[in-house]
Amino acid sequence: MLASLVDAPLQDAAFVYEPKYDGIRAIVEVEPRGDVHLWSRLGNEKTTQFPEIAAALAKWGRRLKAPVVLDGEIVALDAHGNPAGFQQLQGRIHVADIPTRPTRSTSPTPTALIAFDALREGHTDFRDRPLIERRKVLERIFGRTGSPILRMSEQVRGDGREMYKRALASGWEGLIAKHVDSRYASGKRTPDWRKLKIVHEQEFVIGGWTEPRQTREYFGALLIGVYEPRRGRAPALVYSGHIGTGFDQAELARLMKLLKPLETGDCPFVETPKGNERVHWVRPALVAQVKFTEWTADGVLRHPVYLGLRDDKKPRDIRREEGTRLNVMTTRRLDPPHRPESAALLDQLRALEDSRRDGALELPGGDRIEVTNLHKVFWPSLELTKGDLMRYYVEVAPFVLPAIEDRPLVMKRFPNGVDEKPFYQHRVEKVPAGVRVERLEVADARPQIVGGDLKTLLYTTQLAAISQDPWFSRVSSPHFADYVALDLDPSEGVTFERVLEVARLIQEELDRLDATGVPKTSGSRGLHIYIPMPPKTPYEAGLVFCQIIATVVAHKHPKLATIERAVKARGRRVYVDCLQNMMGKTLASAYSARASRYAGVSTPLTWKEVDAGVDREDFTIASMPARLKKVGDLWKPLRTSKGVDLSTIEKYSSAFKDV
C-alpha cells in the first residue's frame, strides 16, 4: 500500500501520524524456524544486502508460533542510532553476493528495520481490517523484539503538530498521515495514507551527463527528467534539470562506469535541453534519488542534490510528484541571462554548506570572497540558513544592486539568527579588497559601506546583515534625496488589508499632484510608498512633502490613518510615518530580505495588486525569484520616472489649510 501526496490536516481525530522514513520500503516474511525474506516494492529480494537485519529477524522469528508478514522501511542509522537519510544507504544498496546469514555486515553503515504494519499471521490475513486493529496486532507481535535494529514505527493519534515540530528540528523527510479506518490495499496508492513532505525528494531518470569543468573528474552534472503522459501517445521523458552536487569522488567514478555503456547519440528527452557544456546522452535506464527545494515555473528543479541511485524503481514509472510543502525552502531561477554566472556561484555555496566547510567563493571576473558558517540557521522556525540567504542574494542581485547602487548602507546584523537581538553598524574599519567603502563628511567622516556590486552585497550578507538598508541619497550628493517614502505601520491588531486601504488613499492624493507613487511591502507587517523627487531636492523639502500628504490623509480618514507618534494614541489605525525622510535614516531596499518570521522580502507591487489585495506573506525569499521572472523589475519606475513638481504642493496644501 502506497501513500499519496494529498493534503492532510496536522490535527484530525480521523488520522494517526508517523514519521516518514527516508529508506527502502520492505515487505518482511519471517518463519518460526528462522527463514527470512526481505522484498522490495518491485519484488526484488533484498535479504542478502542487509544481513544484520536478516540475522536479527531470524533470531527473533524462532520465538514465533506462526509465520508473519510485516510492512516496514529499511533505514540507515546515524552515529546516534537515529534513522538517517537515503544517501547513507548508498553503500548498502549495491552490495551483492553476501551470504544470506552472515554474522556481521560488510559495510560500516549500520541499518535497521522499522515495521509499521502487520499484514498476516499464520493463516489470518489482516489487510481487510482497519488500521487501528492492525496496529494492535503489530504491537503484540513486534513490540518486544529484543533487538535494537528491529523497531516499530512511532505513532500518535489525532494531533501531529508536535511530531511535525520534531520533524523540522530533526531533519526528517516528512510525516505520513494515515486514516484510522484504512484497509490495506496491496500495491495501490490511496489517499487513506498521505505523505506530508517537509523537503522535496523524489526519483528522476538520468538522461545524460556533461563534460567536467576545472578540477572535477569524470563528469560535471547529470541531466535528469521525469516521464509525463501524453494524450494518445506513450509517456515522454521531460527534462527536469542538471544535478552538479552531492557526489564524492568514489561516486563520480562509480556512476561514470555505469553511464559509459549506456551512451548513445540520441537525446532521450522529448525536447533537447540547452547547456553550456558538451552533453553525452544515455539510454534512460538509471534512476537517481534527488532532493531539491522547489520546482521552478518552467518545470526545472531548484537546488537539486544527488542522493544516490535506486534499483527498486522502474524508469518508465517515474513521474513528477506534486504535494504538500510543510516547510518552504529557498528560491527559484532567474531569467536566462543571469543563469550562467549565478549557477556557478550557487553550486559553490551549496557544496560548501553541504560539507559544513568554510571557503572562498569564486566571483565572476576572477575575484574571491571568504564565506563562513553557511549552515548556521538564521530562521529557526523555517530551518533557513545563512547559505539560503546568500543564495537568495546571488539570484536577485541583478535587481537589488541597482536599488542600492552608490548609496551608503546601514547594516542591521543578526549574527545569532532572527530570534536573537540584532545590532546596528554604520562604521566599518577593515574590509576585503574590492568591497566599496567611502568616508562621508556629512556623517562625521566615518568609513561606510556603499552598495552596488556583488562582492559588497555578499560581504554584508556574510556579516549577517539580513536586509539591505540604503540611504535615500547617493555618496556623490548626500544632501539631496532621490526619493522620499511614506512608511505605513499598522498598529497591533490591524490587518494588512487595512494597510492596503490606506495605501489606496495615499495614491488618490498623489494622483491629484500628478506624482508617481511606487508601493512595496516592507517584508514584515507594513507597506512603503516611494515617490521620486526632482534632482537636487534637499531632504528637508522631501520631508515636508511627505508630512503634507500624510496629514491630509489622516485628516480625511481619521478612523483609518494617523500621524500620531505615540503608540498609545494610534489606536487600531495605520501610522503614516514620514520620519525616515532624514539624512542617514533608512528603510529596507526593494528586494531586500527581512528578519520577519516568514522570511519576507520587501517587494515592489503594482497598484492593481494593491487594489485587488495581496497577502504580504506570499513574498518571501522562497517565492521572489519566480515572481521576478514573471513580472520583471517593478522598482525601475522609481529610477526612471520624473520627480514630482514641488511647486504644486503649495496650491495643494492651501486647499487643506484647515488641516
Image (cartoon, rainbow, N blue to C red):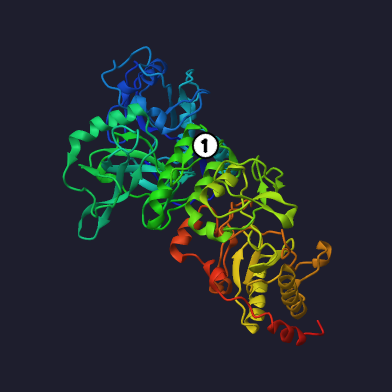
Quadrant in which residue 629 is drawn: bottom left
Q: Is residue 380 above or below residue 109?
A: below
Picture quarter with the C terminus: bottom right
Side of 225 relative to 146 (left or right): left
Element on which disc 1 rests? loop
Quadrant in which residue 642 is drawn: bottom right
Q: Looking at the picture, tell me which residue is in the foreground, 427 or 25.
A: 427
Q: Could you say where residue 372 lies in the image, as x and y percent from the top left?
A: 56, 36
Quadrant in which residue 407 is drawn: bottom right
Within 10 angstroms of label 1, few (less than 14), some, or many (20 or more) residues?
A: some
Q: Is residue 490 above or below residue 166?
A: below
Q: Is residue 565 above or below residue 85?
A: below
Picture quarter with the N terminus: top left
Q: Is residue 499 visible?
A: yes
Count of marks placed on residues: 1
Q: Looking at the picture, tell me which residue is in the foreground, 280 or 370.
A: 370
Q: Residue at x 65, y 84 (%)?
A: 512
Residue corresponding to mark 1: 171
Q: Could you say where residue 96 lies in the image, as x and y percent from the top left?
A: 27, 22
Q: Looking at the picture, tell me which residue is in the foreground, 12 or 462.
A: 462
Side of 366 relative to 371 (left or right): left
Q: Is residue 179 visible?
A: no
Side of 531 relative to 114 (left or right): right
Q: Residue at x 24, y 50 (%)?
A: 269
Q: Residue at x 23, y 60 (%)?
A: 231
Q: Could you say where residue 90 lies in the image, as x and y percent from the top left?
A: 36, 28
Residue at the far left: name it: 265
Q: Could you say where residue 256 lies in the image, as x and y percent from the top left?
A: 26, 32
Q: Residue at x 81, y 68 (%)?
A: 564
Q: Is residue 31 above or below residue 608?
A: above
Hey, what amino acid is under mark 1? Gly
